[in-house]
């Protein structure tokens, strides 16, 4: 393998790692936005005794948060192109 081939494979590896980290970051944002609202609803149900209504509200808010994160990512991806 020549030096140029090694440099190209190193550049490709670097691009792959950056792409993977971007996708992992998006997945983490989506998961955290959902889990935060679900646990908030669960906690509020425990404090107020309104089970399962606030939990369900947390699920709905978590889904809305996931949608907002996805829309933000799609908009940013469209700007890059």
Image (cartoon, grey):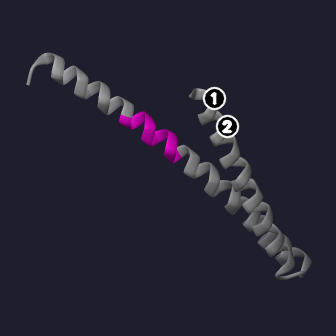
The chief SS type of the magenta part is helix
Provide the residue designation for mark 2.
Answer: 75
Locate the C terminus and report the quarter of the image it occupies: top right
Q: Nearer the viewer, residue 63 or 71?
A: 71
Locate the N terminus and report the quarter of the image it occupies: top left
Q: Residue at x 74, y 49 (%)?
A: 68
In percent of width and height, residue 78 lies at 62, 34
Q: Is residue 61 left or right of residue 1?
A: right
Label 1 crowd bin: few (<14), some (14–19), many (20+), radius 10 Å: few
In percent of width and height, residue 8 lies at 24, 23
Q: Disc number at residue 79?
A: 1
Label 2 crowd bin: few (<14), some (14–19), many (20+), radius 10 Å: few
Q: Disc number at residue 27?
A: none
Q: Residue furthest top?
A: 4
Q: How many marks?
A: 2
SS under mark 2: helix
Q: Residue at x 68, y 62 (%)?
A: 35
Q: Is residue 4 left or right of residue 13?
A: left
Q: Residue at x 74, y 61 (%)?
A: 62
- Identify the magenta region: 16-24
Q: Residue at x 78, y 73 (%)?
A: 42
In percent of width and height, residue 36 lies at 72, 59
Asked whether 18 falls inside the magenta stretch, the response is yes
Q: Is the residue under label 1 in contact with that under label 2 (CB below 8 Å)?
A: yes
Q: Is residue 6 left or right of residue 50?
A: left
């Amino acid at each position: 393998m020549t030096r140029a081939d090694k440099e190209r494979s190193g550049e490709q590896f670097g691009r792959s790692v950056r792409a993977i980290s971007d996708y992992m970051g998006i997945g983490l944002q989506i998961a955290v936005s959902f889990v935060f609202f679900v646990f908030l609803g669960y906690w509020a149900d425990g404090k107020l005794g309104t089970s399962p209504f606030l939990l369900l509200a947390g699920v709905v808010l978590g889904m809305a948060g996931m949608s907002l994160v996805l829309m933000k990512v799609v908009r940013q991806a469209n700007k890059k192109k």
